[in-house]
Image (cartoon, helix red, strand yellow):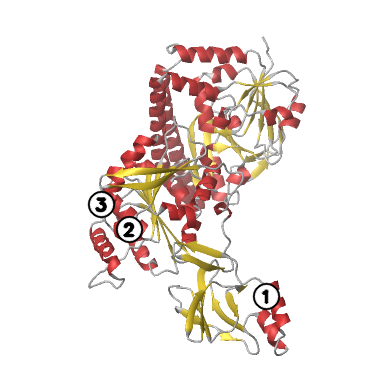
Amino acid sequence: MNPALRKLLRKGTPEPADIDALIAELEFPLVDGPDVTFVFRGAADEVNLRCWISGLDTAQPFQALPGTDLWATTIELPKGSRIEYKFEVIKNGTRELILDPLNEVIAHDPFGANSVCQGYGYVRPEWTLHDPQARAGSLQRLQVDSGIFKEPREIQVYLPATFRSNRRYPLLIVHDGIDYLRYADLKAVLDNLTHRLEIPSVITALIESPDRLKEYGGDDRHARFLVEDLLPFMNDAYPLLDAANARCLMGASFGGVAALHAAWRFPEQFGSLLLQSGSFAFSDIGRHNRGPVFDPVVRFMNEFREQPGIPADRIFMSCGMYESLIYENRSLVPHLQAKGVELRFEEARDAHNWENWRDRLRIGLSWLMPGPAWMVYE
Amino acid sequence: MNTEMPLRLLLGPQRPVVNLDSAVAQSGIGDGPIGVISAAWQEAEGDIDDVQRLLPNPLFDLRLYQRTEELFAADERLREAYRRRQDRLKEQQRLYSMRLKHLMVAARETLRIEGEPAVVAAERRHAISQLRALDRHHLAQVEKAHTRFDSVFNADSHKLLAEHTAAIEDELSRFETVLMTGGNVIVLMNRLRLFGLDRLLRHKSIIAWSAGAMVLCDRIVFFHDRLPQGRRDPEIVGLGMGLLPGIVLLPDAKGRLQAKDLVRIRLFSRRFAPASCMTLDNGSLLSYAGETLRDSEAAKRITRNGRFKRVRAA
């Protein structure tokens, strides 16, 4: 048991005021080295910790602390871990998933929000936070008339603060770009890394799909949209460097599949790829067990693994150790390296979520697109 | 004609501590007007109010960056040729970097390895000589790209360039002293070269910090062991103005170099020998009369064994 809770219970049943004082004094969850104790206060028949971490039980039961309305459970988290979680509270036969009422640290995603446990040794990187010293780039909303999808597609384009129309810029294309802005602070990250000269000034196309599970899952139409619709549009609209090594495709999860697939279908169009927690499911024999939405992904990945070719000269991959996709991502690394791709792979003690992807952006972007810090001596 | 050796006052980064004011006050430069080259600041060129507050001398920016922009806007052929040259130089640097990586690994290994002293020493010498040969080859290729461009676009053949060069020369004639700021070394060096400033600055007294100081040397060496994507081996990027031959300047060495990695530092020193590798950290000062060191503060020289020793004037 956590030392603070043990102390509370040492003299028998604590008064409610003692519990109030303890809760006011401490930050929750209680992080004591690798031991993390989650605490829930309230009436319930059963409480579980739900954190969807590959390797841990799906539901971690809480213990009721005798003589109190407190519930607690302790798990072990290795140094540097960061996990997202909810509490499952069961009362009178009703099951409810709630955010941790005692924890203000929350991460958002397209499905809502989760509480965040920052294990010992994890600190949110300062370059992910707004820096008033960093000049802010601008966002433009545009429409690309897609001949492939026979409809206009909304995109946003990030222009760096130092943008000048008589310069030429590399291009970064981000799948699920709007989600990257909302949930992974991509704009602040681009502003900061550009300001610190860790990446060059880059024009960034933020794209999204109305049906991402289909279009991002190894769909030829999406690859053609990128090459036949988006690239010509961007080249007409902005001063871009005309070379594959100045074009980078980026994406997470199914967006990672879409980036890899497009680069594979159109080799020599994209010089670099930034793939985060790619949903690179495959099957060596028989059927996969990830559900029908993965069928086209598995078809593509099986074909890709047979004939990977060289989708891009440089690939940065990252994946959370606490997501099941770590196995697929790890297994892709030697495949690509054997083909001569210059590849860097980073693992993090995190899971399949936007803040994991946010925290890996600095190393990924600066490795793929080194900035002028090298040549600036202030 | 002034026969005194021109002053070269070299400083480290001016943040967090500023020593420009005290260095200038002690230098005996006087309070005459000073020409400023802040092209290394690119779009921020000419934002010299903060510098002006430090010095009693009136400051006038020579606008090398802005003049280049005007040239590009007026002559598309020049702009395109300049872009092609820069693309070629980037490609040249990429290939050099790729080859360098392998030679550096081998050279570091020879510095680490223990064995029969005579055998090891011979292999070390050869490994370092291979590095120097690659550096020389790269420098020659870089110069070739510059020379090709310069042979077409120069003040003798290009009217607008000649006008700007003459205007700069005219402005410079008002100043005995020129101040060069830190910033982007490549941008600065390219502008100095475009307008033939190496010739015009030779007899001026020069106060320079960081990037401004680096371009005074005969070779410009980039270095950074603390990039977010990982350390990068030191690379020669081109010739400087050669006003201070035989030294390699390392601004912000404390921030950029992993000084405790003795093998890397030893290799740094030996690779560029007989040039002397000298640090210019925040608060540092090196003062030369012509090519002779007269004074120093907090600057260090890297010894052959990878140690940092205070630079002392003879």
Q: Residues within 10 Å of mark 2 (few under 14, many from 20)?
A: few
Quarter of the figure with the N terminus of chain A: bottom right
Snapshot quadrant of residue B278: top right
Nearer the observer, B285 or B267: B285
Q: Secondary structure at mark 3?
A: helix
Quarter of the figure that contains the C terminus of chain A: top right
Which mark is first along the chain, 1 or 3? Answer: 1
Task: Report the Cα–Cα distance between label 2 and label 3.
Answer: 12 Å
Q: Chain of mark 1?
A: A
Q: CA distance from mark 3 to mark 1?
A: 54 Å
Q: Chain of mark 2?
A: A
Q: Is residue B174 above or below residue B187?
A: above
Residue type marked 2: Asp
Of the image marks 1 and 2, the number of the one nearer the N terminus = 1
**The disc numbered 3 marks a residue on which chain?**
A
* Amino acid type indicated by mark 3: Arg
Residue position marked by numbered label 2 in the rendering: A211
Q: Which residue lies under the disc numbered 3?
A: A221
Q: Is residue B263 left or right of residue B93?
A: right
User: Of marks 2 and 3, which one's residue comes earlier in the chain?
Assistant: 2
Cα separation between marks 1 and 2: 44 Å
User: In front here: A121 or B47?
Assistant: B47
Badge number at residue A23: 1
Q: Secondary structure at mark 2?
A: loop
The residue nearer to you, when weighing A63 against B202, is: A63
Quarter residue B98 falls in: top left
Measuring from the top left, give residue A30's x and y in whole percent.
Answer: 62, 74
